[in-house]
Amino acid sequence: MSFFQSGFALTQPAMRVRFGPGVRRDTRAEIERLGCARAAILSTPGKTAMAEALAADIGALAAGIVPLAEMHTPVPVTEAALREVKRIGADCLVAIGGGSTVGLGKALALRTGLPQIVLPTTYAGSEATPVLGQTESGRKTTMTDPRVQPQVILYDAELVRSLPVPITVASALNAMAHALEGLYARDRNPVSTLFAVEGLRAFRAALPAVREDPGDLEARGETLYGAWLCGPVLGQVGMALHHKLCHVLGGSFGLPHAETHAVMLPHTIAFNARAAGALLDPVRDLFGEDDVGHALATFADKVGAPRALRDLGMKEDDLDHAADLVMEASYWNPRPLVRDEILTLLKAAWTDA
């Protein structure tokens, strides 16, 4: 299958990417390569032990640990972290963690201009993008800015080896969502499509293997490879209804980010499948089924993904308000958005119908 397009535009940010079990031990060398000497180590409050171990490896180049990252990157948290980064005199940011920590690093880079090194411990892929989502006053907004793109990414399969399977699965489906929506993006290009298809292939092949044996470093490495491939798709092209829904549900109702993506994905892709038409044929080929929504639901069941919004804490009474929020300044989407149809979609996702 050829992904040639007669006309397209492509912007590729400068980014150093390294893969390999144990590559995290080269973090000090990467700090020196950037010409820096005082690294702020970012983490969530619950991952300080991992941050401390990394700081010990870095040695004298570790200026301090900033364990403040929170889900959906709340602006007040970023402001508190900014004060600490300034206090310790950091000249670079080293983020070790999942999307929350990566998001904090990006938000700090936007405000300070400091270079970033990221060591992902989940599969969201946001580290490979110039996209930042922030939450303030109950609303989550996103922006694309080259200033938030990390300069170095170190993918170490050992860091995700102990990631609990439920978190692994939800995070992987979050990454797959970037690739799936990228296939029908109006500003897609051949490179974004190639990345999307190969990223989906990697997850389809390796995620069941990780579920079977979470300690399989080869499978863990391939899922990280999938995450890296799906991430730049998000950074290169515009997303559509799926991401809008997930930002509303997460930013306005406090639902967990990756799990929300996992629940919504079969529903949103099914919603757009007819309008997207042949652009989703690579998904049909990968999963061996014409009904892409059903194929994704079957895959989600196979890997044990969450399937209902009610199980994530969403209240049925809030679905109407969520539909209203989605219709406000809504994203471009291949299928026109109708408020009652969005509500029907949300109700189906709430019950897993």
Image: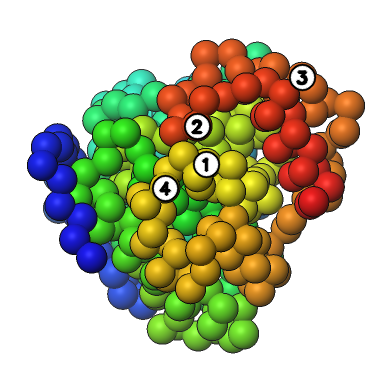
Kind of residue at badge 1: Asn
In this picture, is 95 found above or below 289? above
- Can residue 261 be seen in the rendering of this structure? no
Numbered circle sitting on residue 277: 4
Q: Report the residue marked by disc 1.
A: 272
Query: Count of labels shown?
Result: 4
Q: Residue 272 placed where, x, y %?
A: 52, 41
Q: Residue 263 placed where, x, y %?
A: 68, 50
The quadrant in which residue 343 appears is top right
- Left or right relative to 86: residue 122: right
Q: CA distance from mark 4 to mark 2?
A: 11 Å
Q: Report the residue marked by disc 3.
A: 321
Q: Earlier in the sequence, mark 4 or mark 2?
A: 4
Observer-side mark, 3 or 1, equals: 1
Disc 4 residue crowd, few under 14, some 14–19, many 20+, Cα 10 Å: few
Element at badge 3?
helix
Tell me what residue is drawn at x 41 percent, y 83 percent. 218
Kind of residue at badge 3: His
Element at badge 2?
loop
